[in-house]
Image: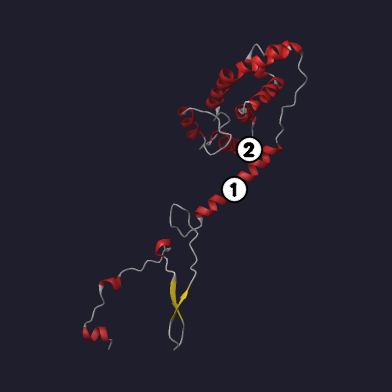
C-alpha cells in the first residue's frame, strides 16, 4: 500500500499548486542550473535559456507581435516601391501664356489644369508640403476607380500614406474629419476621403497659393 494512503500523510498545499509554465521574466531568470547524470555528483553550470519571442508590452509566447511587425514592414516596402514607380508629373499639353496668367489669378483655374497642377506641385515641393497635392490627386484617382477590389486597395494605401499618424507624409486634418474617415475606411467607397480632400484643397488655397502667386508675379516682372 502507498505510504501516503497508509499513514494518511498529505503534501503541503504549495506542492499541489499549479505550476507556472509561462516565460520567465528577465529579473527572475536563473543564471545557474544543476547539471549532471548518473551517480556522479551534481555540479553547478551556467545555462543559456531561450527567451520567448515576445513583444515589449506583453510576455506572450505566441509569435503574433513579431509576425505583425514583419507584415507591416513587407507592406511598407511594397508601398514604397509602388510610390517610387509613380510618375512625378501628370501628362499634359504645353499651356498657353493666357492659361499661365490665369493660374496667378484663380486657384480653381490652376487646379483644373494638369499643367497648372504640375507647376503648383513643384512649388509645394520647395515648401515641403508636396504631400497635400499628392493626397488630393490620389483622392481624384480613387473617385475614377470602377473596380471594387482595386478601389478598396487604393483607399487603404491613401489612408496609410496620408492619414495615418505614423506616416511621414501625413496631411493636416482636424479631428472631426479624421473621425469620419476612421468610420468610413472600414467599408471604403470612392468618396471616403471627400471631406478630407476638400479640407486639404482649402488649406492649399489659403496657405500655399498666395506665396505661389507672389513667386509667379516676380517671375513675370524679371
| The N terminus sits in image quarter | bottom left
Would you identify the image quadrant in which residue 147 lies?
top right
Residue labelled with disc 2: 150
Residue labelled with disc 1: 73
Q: Position of residue 91 (x, y in %)?
A: 75, 26
As displayed, is residue 5 above or below residue 91?
below
217 or 51, nearer to the observer? 217
Q: Are marks 1 and 2 in contact (CB under 8 Å)?
A: no
Q: Position of residue 202 (x, y in %)?
A: 55, 20
151 or 110, nearer to the observer? 110
Q: Element at badge 2? A: helix
Would you identify the image quadrant in which residue 75 lies?
top right
| 183 on left or right of 214 | left
Question: Could you tell me which residue is drawn at 57 percent across and 33 percent down?
Answer: 162
Q: Element at badge 1? A: helix
Q: Position of residue 181 (x, y in %)?
A: 50, 32
As displayed, is residue 48 above or below residue 201?
below
| The C terminus sits in image quarter | top right
Question: Could you tell me which residue is drawn at 64 percent across and 18 percent down?
Answer: 212
Q: Counting other residues with Cα less than 10 Å from the Cα at mark 1, is it few (<14), some (14-19), or many (20 or more)?
A: few
Q: Position of residue 196 (x, y in %)?
A: 53, 27
| 150 on left or right of 173 | right
**View extreme (left): residue:** 8
75 or 143, nearer to the observer? 75
Q: Earlier in the sequence, mark 1 or mark 2?
A: 1
Q: Counting other residues with Cα less than 10 Å from the Cα at mark 2, is it few (<14), some (14-19), or many (20 or more)?
A: few
| Disc 1 to disc 2, C-alpha distance | 21 Å
Question: Could you tell me which residue is drawn at 58 percent across and 30 percent down?
Answer: 190
| 123 on left or right of 62 | right
Question: Could you tell me which residue is drawn at 76 percent across and 12 percent down?
Answer: 97
- Would you say residue 25 is visible in this rendering? no
Q: Which mark is residue 102?
A: none
Amino acid at each position: 500500500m502507498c505510504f501516503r494512503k497508509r499513514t494518511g500523510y498529505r503534501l503541503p498545499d504549495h506542492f499541489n499548486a499549479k505550476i507556472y509554465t509561462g516565460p520567465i521574466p528577465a529579473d527572475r531568470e536563473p543564471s545557474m542550473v544543476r547539471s549532471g547524470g548518473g551517480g556522479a555528483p551534481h555540479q553547478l553550470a551556467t545555462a543559456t535559456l531561450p527567451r520567448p519571442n515576445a513583444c515589449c508590452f506583453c510576455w506572450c509566447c505566441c509569435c503574433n507581435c513579431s509576425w505583425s511587425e514583419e507584415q507591416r514592414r513587407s507592406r511598407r516596402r511594397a508601398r514604397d516601391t509602388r510610390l517610387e514607380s509613380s510618375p512625378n508629373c501628370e501628362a499634359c499639353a504645353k499651356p498657353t501664356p493666357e492659361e499661365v496668367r490665369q493660374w496667378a489669378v484663380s486657384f480653381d483655374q490652376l487646379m483644373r489644369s494638369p499643367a497648372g497642377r504640375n507647376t503648383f506641385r513643384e512649388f509645394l515641393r520647395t515648401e515641403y508640403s508636396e504631400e497635400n497635392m499628392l493626397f488630393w490627386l490620389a483622392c481624384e484617382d480613387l473617385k475614377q476607380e470602377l473596380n471594387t477590389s482595386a478601389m478598396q486597395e487604393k483607399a487603404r494605401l491613401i489612408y496609410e500614406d496620408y492619414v495615418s499618424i505614423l506616416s511621414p507624409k501625413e496631411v493636416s486634418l482636424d479631428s472631426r474629419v479624421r473621425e469620419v474617415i476612421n468610420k468610413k475606411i472600414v467599408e471604403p467607397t470612392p468618396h471616403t476621403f471627400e471631406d478630407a480632400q476638400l479640407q486639404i484643397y482649402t488649406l492649399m488655397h489659403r496657405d500655399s497659393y498666395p506665396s505661389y502667386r507672389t513667386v509667379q508675379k516676380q517671375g513675370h516682372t524679371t
